[in-house]
Image (cartoon, rainbow, N blue to C red):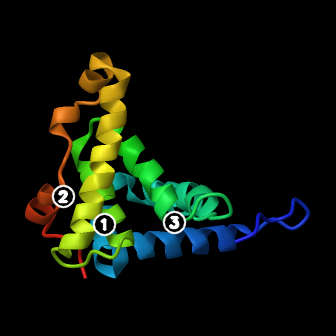
Amino acid sequence: MPIPSRSNPPSTAEITSRGRTTLLSIYGETLLPKIMSSWGSHRADFDHMETSILYGQFLSNHSVLNAVESQIVVLSSMLCTGFRAPGMWHLRGMGRLLGARGIGSDAVLKDLEKAREAVMECVRWCGDEMVGRTRLEQWPTVSDVVRELGGFGE
């Protein structure tokens, strides 16, 4: 997708639609509502932020990074927060972009685990302080996605 010209930027509706399309491509019709329902009373605010701003404005603009490249940046960032649940959701999302459905195919799961290990190696390279801050040893695994989330959805 080309970068919109400054004289003709996409409308708010187009940005929101683009964000929704990207989110659905990652999480699907079944998983996305489950994720959004986990936000409780903040659902409307998070829905707007995720759909229109994060994904609509930035992560669905594939003029620089494609969908998989964008998701690996997001996955890396989420894993490095040390928060297990969001890291697991994004690990599942990355798997879906790579083609995993249900419990996933061996080839896709191996690729997904290689991506996770690559991020882990970058954290290790940064040193013990970074390993501790990111809670590296507690990061979710591909097996955790299958066991705890029931896999990658349909």
The foreground one among 136 and 5 is 136
Query: In terms of secondary structure, where does tag 2 sit?
Result: helix
Classify 10 Å Cα crowding around label 3: few (below 14), some (14-19), many (20 and above): some
Which residue appears farthest toward the right when viewing the image?
7
Name the quadrant containing residue 3. Answer: bottom right
Query: Where residue 16 sits: x, y (%)?
Result: 60, 69
What's the residue at 24%, 22% (across, down)? 132
**What's the CA distance linking mark 1 and mark 2?**
9 Å
Q: Is residue 51 visible?
A: yes
What's the residue at 29%, 78% (across, down)? 30
The amino acid type found where label 2 is placed reads Val
Q: Which residue corresponds to mark 2?
A: 142
Q: Is residue 51 above or below residue 31?
A: above
The amino acid type found where label 3 is placed reads Ala
Q: Which mark is residue 67?
A: 3
The amino acid type found where label 1 is placed reads Gly
